[in-house]
Amino acid sequence: MLAVPALIVFGLFSLWPLINVLRYATWRWSGTSEPVPVGWDNYLRLFSDPMLWQSLGVTALFAVITVPAFLVLSIVIAWAIEGVRAERFIKALLFAPGLITVSGSAIAWYLLYNPDFGLLIELTGFALPWNSQPAAAMAYIVLFTLWQQTGYGVLVASAALRGVPAEIKEAARIDGAGEGQVRRQIVLPMLQPVVLFLTVVGTVFALQAYTAVSLLTRGGPFGSTRVIGYYLYETAFERFDLGYGAALTVFVMILTLAVALLQASAMARRGRAATGT
């Protein structure tokens, strides 16, 4: 009986919307017109949509850059500040961007780094030409995402580092291991679960990236930052093709789940190989 309220909330706000999305995906519907059943046509259209595959390529590039950088920064910073006097203060500073709404952060970044009138170009004369050069636009979105999410990764990695028994590290030092060897051969393998967790979280963030792109670059220039989340938004709410937008939603959901499961499986196999089990 105690689980009934939670099940009701889950049904109303998770299961019922999902069922509706699956239903909408079988319609040709603009949201205001009468829906026309089209069966599997919207799903079949996925395979012949060049803009979908372009957005998948952009999303993959974004993930390939962002996820490793997110992992490395999280672990390296957590290691660097471990035990220092200002550790809590540094963590608070790093985590603060994640507490600000993405829209508020995006407005601040737009005003700071706009290549035409931003504060950076006014003070230094240097500007990142993200509104005209595709590589600069991708770097802009990547940097914004890392600025927002790295603090969370540092907190998770720091908590995992505190969970490594000090006795194991001390025993390794007594046996003659240097600090670098202790970290590489003892601490890092014990962080495998955290690395897996942060990899999955970072990948899900990358696959579902939308708000930053919408507010900062709107997919430009020349579609260079049109990640799949933004393409879904364009399709459903700018072109009013809600039926196909629902099919895209189902596709993104399945893709996200599949990638997360593959990553978890790969990391689990690597962990078993490392421990010889």
Image (cartoon, grey):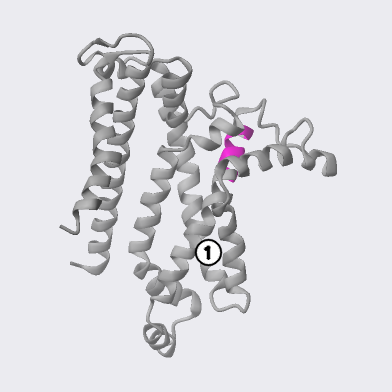
Residue picked out by circle 1? 76
Look at the image and say whether residue 49 sits in the magenta stretch: no
Picture quarter with the N terminus: bottom left
Q: Main secondary structure of the magenta part?
A: helix
Q: Element at badge 1?
A: helix
Q: Residue at x 27, y 39 (%)?
A: 12
Q: Which residues are magenta?
A: 136-143
Q: Residue 224 falls in which quadrant of the image? A: top right
Residue 1 relative to residue 44: left or right = left
- Residue 273 vertical position relative to residue 139 in the rendered view, above or below: below
Instruction: Point out residue 128 in the picture as x, y percentages from the top left corner.
Output: 71, 36
- At label 1, the amino acid type is Val
Residue 172 relative to residue 138: left or right = left
Instruction: Point out residue 248 in the picture as x, y percentages from the top left corner.
Output: 34, 25
Picture quarter with the C terminus: bottom left
- Residue 249 vertical position relative to residue 206 in the rendered view, above or below: above
Look at the image and say whether residue 141 sits in the magenta stretch: yes
Instruction: Point out residue 119 in the picture as x, y percentages from the top left corner.
Output: 79, 41
